[in-house]
Image (tube, rainbow, N blue to C red):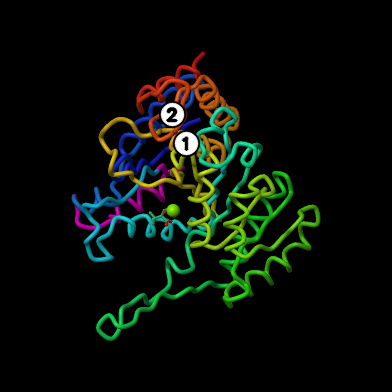
Amino acid sequence: MEKKIVLLPGDGIGPEIMDSAVAVLEAIAQRYKHQFHFNTQLIGGAAIDEVNMPLPDQTIQAAEQADAVLLGAVGGPKWDNNPSELRPERGLLKIRKSLDLYANLRPVKGFETLLSASPLKEDIIKGSDVLIVRELTSGLYFGQPSERRDNDQSVVDTLHYTLHEMKRIIKKGFESAQLRRKKLTSVDKANVLESSKLWREIVEAEKVHFPDVEVEHLLVDAAAMKLITEPSRFDVIVTENMFGDILSDEASVLTGSLGMLPSASLAENGVGLYEPAHGSAPDIAGLGIANPIAMILSTAMMLRYSFAMNVEAKAIEKAVETCINKGLHTADLHVDHGIKVSTSEMTEAIIKELTI
Ligand code: IPM
Ligand code: MG
């Protein structure tokens, strides 16, 4: 197959881990006889430095014309004091909105050999395998207008959702559960928020279309607690934007490091953007020690969801697992055994497993 992929390396460790993704894709192309055409574009702080805006139109156009988009990470202290419209994160939010990437899928699955890397007890996290389905293009992140009032004496952020926005992500949650262990946990704050009450009503109405899926409602505070006390009770969690952001970082603790978590952001028309769930880690940028696994697993998700290359996606996931089982780990994983490797050593090891 021939595919056009837009690369958005972004900031911090973004460019380093993007190199890893490209190297893996080149190995896949060679082994499975595909042609991948890469087109690198600007986003985030890198775009602010170059063209004084976090998401140039050219990037959006290239993404619209591509078969899929891969993104590294955005942000860093360099731009922290910029006005909001010139913050790197704006670029990320804008591309999500422009491409209508409403469904963010974040699988969280621990590797058996890394159980000891988590600060949580091994017997608690053993067997946990959760998919967080996070709404990505609405809610508090996109409420208008967001403003300071009366000389900073008060401030407004608006949580707005349309019925359509809630319905489509809830449906995605049910569909995802149907493809897995058929259990859906809907997370909200229906004891306080009006938006959550409507959310819960939609879940209740939608469940008649998915009779094989078991549904439960959890308040977000209880969900946060159960995620680290009883993680194996979860299959699919569906929730709104902000709750999903918080719960997915929390869930990463199950895998030992945020550096292990891939994600797919999907639109209704099939467009997909794939990025690690972690940030740009400016403190370790340029040191060659970043964990490339979240980026590489995001690449596998791209092959599966955007190109239907299931065999190739599985091959990457298996190669990653083999390397981890051999004890290879980057510095972010606190394990007392195995071999500590750099970003490029980990990438090469994964590629080697792919090509044998
Ligand atoms: C994420 C990140 C982003 C978010 C930031 C960088 C805007 O934390 O993808 O989870 O909050 O969505
Ligand atoms: Mg986040």
Q: Quadrant of residue 7?
A: top left
Q: Which mark is residue 299?
A: 1
Q: Which mark is residue 177?
A: none
Q: Residue furthest right?
A: 211
Spatial CA distance of label 2 from label 1 is: 8 Å
Counting from the top left corner in percent of width and height, residue 148 is at 31, 78
Q: Which residues are magenta?
A: 50-70
73 with respect to 273 (left or right): left
The residue tagged 2 is 25
Q: Residue at x 33, y 60 (%)?
A: 90
Indicate the amino acid at tag 2: Leu
Tag 1's secondary structure? helix
| Other residues around mark 1 within 10 Å, as few (<14) / some (14–19) / many (≥20) | many
Camera-side residue: 266 or 351?
351
Please state the quadrant of the image where ligand 1 appears: bottom left
Indicate the amino acid at tag 1: Thr
213 with respect to 88 (left or right): right
17 in the magenta segment: no
Q: Residue at x 20, y 57 (%)?
A: 52
Counting from the top left corner in percent of width and height, residue 178 is at 72, 49
Q: Are marks 2 and 1 in contact (CB under 8 Å)?
A: yes
Tag 2's secondary structure? helix
Q: Residue at x 65, y 51 (%)?
A: 236
